Image (cartoon, helix red, strand yellow):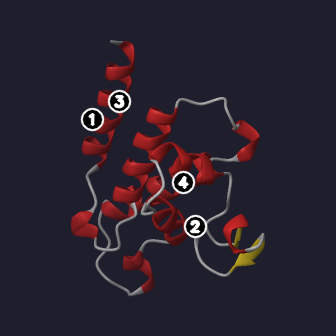
Amino acid sequence: MAPEWVYNLSITSKVDVYSYGIVLLEMVTGRSPGVGVLDASVGGETENRGLTSWVKQKMSGEVPMATRIEEIVDHSIEGGYDVKKVEVLVAVALQCVADDKDDRPTMSQVVEMLHRCTNKAEI
């Protein structure tokens, strides 16, 4: 849920951008945003933290990007994806779920970022 709803702030189209980012993260990780995250790095135990903070933490690590992506991608699609495309999806998703609505892109900007990713792949 976008912070605007939680803190009773003015509602704009940016709440839809936030929701889109959550959906992207759910698709990539195969995890629900409202449930604790099972994390092998803490002994395979469920951590009581949300999906967005878990992905942000994983993406800010010092390990190579391909390893970070591998850690967050749904294991049921393991190996069946383009790491660069997933990297773009995650980057876009994290921009969409920024806590401050002014830091989130518009949906037009999201579409443009995703189009650039697919256009590069066709070259």
Q: CA distance from mark 2 to mark 3?
A: 24 Å
Labels 2 and 4 touching (C-beta < 8 A):
yes
Name the residue carrying label 4: 25
Q: CA distance from mark 2 to mark 4?
A: 8 Å
Identify the residue at image location x=44%, y=42%.
87
Residue 25: give x, y in percent of width and height: 54, 54
Q: CA distance from mark 3 to mark 4?
A: 17 Å
Q: CA distance from mark 3 to mark 1?
A: 9 Å
Labels 3 and 1 touching (C-beta < 8 A):
no
Name the residue carrying label 2: 51
Q: Which residue, as the protein is rendered here, is positioned at the far left? A: 102
Dot placed on the residue nearer the N-terminal end, 2 or 4: 4
Kindly state the secondary structure of the residue where label 2 is placed: helix
Dot placed on the residue nearer the N-terminal end, 4 or 1: 4
**Residue 95 placement: quadrant:** bottom left
Location of residue 69 with respect to 57 vertically, above or below: above
Kindly state the secondary structure of the residue where label 3 is placed: helix
